[in-house]
Amino acid sequence: MLELKKTTLQQVTQNIQKQFTSYAKQDFSNCIQMPIFQLNYFINQAIQKHKVISISYKDIHDNEFVATGFISRNKNNKTILKLDSLGDNLSHLLNINQIKYIKLAKR
């Protein structure tokens, strides 16, 4: 009986992990820089509709990164954004100029 509960718990854990990792597997290799007005439009839509999005962004050394989660704007400065990642409990603080591309996360 104990072994059955253990395998059931393992199956549930594996299913949850698969759901989170499926969000992370986003390919941004052939995506070009989106214009600022388009980025703002997509960000506003994602905030209003509370959608999970994937963002390709650059750091100060032009290294590209991908993050997936829910996005929000800073109340005092509309160009600063916070992306709360799914699965790893990490928040990314971004400037609108760092973002290269945005798309809805696939499930």
Image: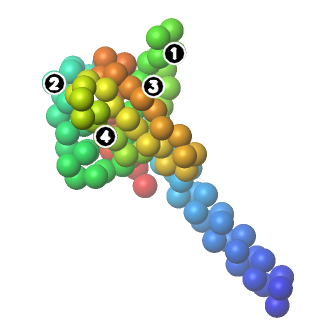
Structural distance between the alpha carbons of marks 3 and 1: 13 Å
Q: Which mark is residue 29?
A: 3
Percent coordinates x, y for residue 40 in the rendering? 20, 30
Q: Which mark is residue 50?
A: none
SS type, badge 2: helix
Comparing 102 with 75, the one in front is 75
Q: What residue did someone put label 1 on?
A: 63
Q: Earlier in the sequence, mark 1 or mark 2?
A: 2
Percent coordinates x, y for residue 98 in the rendering? 37, 19
Label count reads 4
Q: Which mark is residue 72?
A: 4
Amino acid carrying mark 3 in the image = Ser
Structural distance between the alpha carbons of marks 1 and 2: 23 Å
Residue 67 as seen in the image, left or right of residue 102 = right
Q: Are marks 3 and 2 in contact (CB under 8 Å)?
A: no
Q: What residue did someone put label 2 on?
A: 37
